[in-house]
Image (spheres, rainbow, N blue to C red):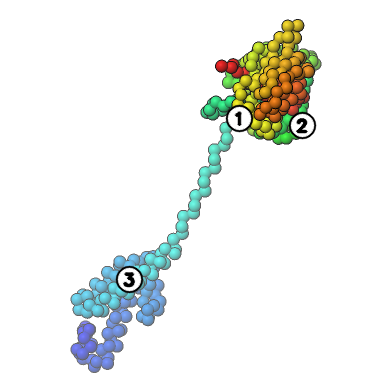
Amino acid sequence: MILFSTDRLRPISFGGRRLPSAQIGAKRRVIQMSAWKKILKPAGRTCKTAGIPGTAIPRKSGSAGTVLKHLIADNGTMKKNPIHALFRVFFAAAIGLSSLLSSCAGVEEPSEELPEPPPAAAPLPERKPVSINWAGTTWIIPDSPDKKPKNHPDYRGFHLGSDGKLFLINLDTATGNEWSAQGNRLSMSLLSGRPEIPLEGAFLAFSAEEDDEAIACGSEAAKHTDSDGTAAEANKKGDNPAENAAVRKIRLVPEAMPDSEGLILQRAEANKDLVFNHWVPMALKDGETVHWPANREVHLMLLSDGAGGLGILGYGGENRFHGPVNVGMEDFIVGAIAMTKKIGLASEFENLYVGHIDAVNRYVQVRDELYLYRDTLFLVSFSAEIFD
């Protein structure tokens, strides 16, 4: 039996015989190393650490709490030698920290899950082509319902002239040129500029009606007309008024992108009679270069001349004017204008205004508005109003 004391001055017995002080320290270290090996060897591989040969570093199979428990519970060492026991606690904490870091390094982080692919887009509903007599029709993108009323309407669109001319409506940054159609394929060209909405090139026209039954009937009628080779002549003469009236809303899709949303346009017609109404100017070409008079009496009227014809009567801000006018399906040709000679603050505006009226030769009516053109070049627009 081995007996030793932590007090170096106290003799110790080994194997039944007393040892001198020099040998006591050596024997104590041997016994301590044996105790360390018994405690730490099951926890992992042995290595030389912290100057103690043969000590073991706990791996994943052990835990710092287990090592600490064994170290401080060795034969009541805490009671016999508190300093020695404290050393063991610190050493166990270091081993536990090393074990924790080693364990963390060995755990693989979970890979990030790839996002699920978006669901496949729903197939587009079948679109029904629209094939009508396009000549003389007007199509607009209507005003936004959430906008407050303004003096100038917000709708934009175009009129397809009966002679193949294209008239842009409220798209003053461009000038239309010509249009042509074959079945539901509509082609449009511009003379200059670029409008706010894409209207140049080839487009396919489809029904945008909520109920397409009437459109389907009209399309069938158009197919029968095409079969006998008289479609072009029928369209030119406008022999299908029922078919034209059935179409009130269309979807215009670029031919190069047939699956795109395209533009939704509504059929537009005149709400006011051209004759016997006061037309107040809304916009002038180059109108931003002159000062508009505050006088609301600036207007234009079309009246009977008493001889079966029509004449214009108006006020330009300084002078009254009148003259003959020839009005056809789309023609608006003004003859020689007679005007008083007063000069005032509104003369610059008046000269531009009356000069545009004198130059026009075409017109388009949309709802309560009147648009006058020189060929396809916009010059002046009016709104029908009643004076107080």
User: Residue at the spot x=66%, y=23% of the render?
Assistant: 317
- Earlier residue among tags 1 and 2: 1
Quadrant assignment for the N terminus:
bottom left
User: Residue at the spot x=33%, y=67% of the render?
Assistant: 64
Q: CA distance from mark 1 to mark 3?
A: 68 Å
What amino acid is at disc 2?
Answer: Leu
User: Residue at the spot x=57%, y=27% of the render?
Assistant: 150
Query: What residue would you read off at disc 2?
Result: 191
Query: What residue would you read off at disc 3?
Result: 93
* Contact (Cβ within 8 Å) of mark 1 with mark 2: no
* Front residue of 338 and 111: 338
- Give the image quarter of residue 388: top right
* Front residue of 130 and 358: 358
Side of 39 relative to 152 (left or right): left
Q: Position of residue 5 (x, y in %)?
A: 21, 84
What amino acid is at disc 3?
Answer: Ala
Mark in the foreground, 1 or 2: 2
Q: Secondary structure at mark 1?
A: loop
Q: Position of residue 279 (x, y in %)?
A: 65, 19
- Earlier residue among tags 3 and 2: 3
Q: Position of residue 177 (x, y in %)?
A: 76, 28
